[in-house]
Amino acid sequence: MKFSYKLSDAIHILAYLEINQNDADLSSRMIASSIEANPSVVRNLMRDLKAGGMINTRQGSARPSLAKDPAKISLLEVYQALDMNQNLLHVDPKTNPNCLVGANIQATLDEAYRRVEEVAFQEMAQVTIQDIVDGIVKRSNNVK
């Protein structure tokens, strides 16, 4: 099974920009070195974050910045800005329709997953980029 790290990487970018806002080099190459990803991955995510109103960028300038206070950017907002499947949980579409379980599991799981996602989205709306930044700073202070 392949997992997408888009949300994690997008949150990483936003936290990186906030924590390193005074650094001279905020290029996609530098951010990519923190994520250990290709700079094109960072640029694509930054495009989505810019379209979502979370960052400001200028072509030819390696000075992206948050477009608003990190306490006002929720994880749900980040999730919704990304160009990805908006479902957290996925049901296997290939089940045996001639089996009692196989014939009914998809609709049953769809209903259960919808309820779980609703709670997850409510929680994601409560967690902000500032919370993530605070957690990073706290952990970095404990490491020293």
Image (cartoon, helix red, strand yellow):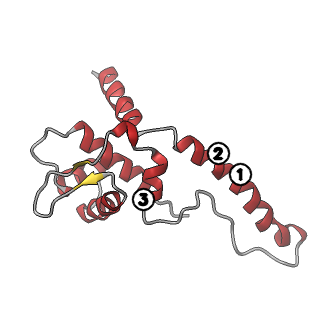
Q: Is residue 11 above or below residue 40?
A: above
Q: Is residue 129 above or below residue 27?
A: above
Q: Secondary structure at mark 3?
A: helix
The label shown at residue 119 is: 2
Density class for disc 3 (Cα within 10 Å; few <14, some 14-19, many ≥20) is: many
Q: Find residue 68 and report its image quarter.
A: top left
Q: Is residue 33 above or below residue 82?
A: above
Amino acid type, callout 3 = Ala
Q: Residue at x 40, y 44 (%)?
A: 73
Q: Are marks 1 and 2 in contact (CB under 8 Å)?
A: yes
Density class for disc 2 (Cα within 10 Å; few <14, some 14-19, many ≥20) is: few
The label shown at residue 115 is: 1
Amino acid type, callout 2 = Val
Residue 88: give x, y in percent of width and height. Answer: 58, 57
Q: Which residue ends up furthest to the bottom in the rendered image?
A: 98
Distance of label 1 from label 2 (alpha carbons): 7 Å
Q: Secondary structure at mark 2?
A: helix
Look at mark 3 in the image and give the residue it sits on: 81
Q: Secondary structure at mark 1?
A: helix
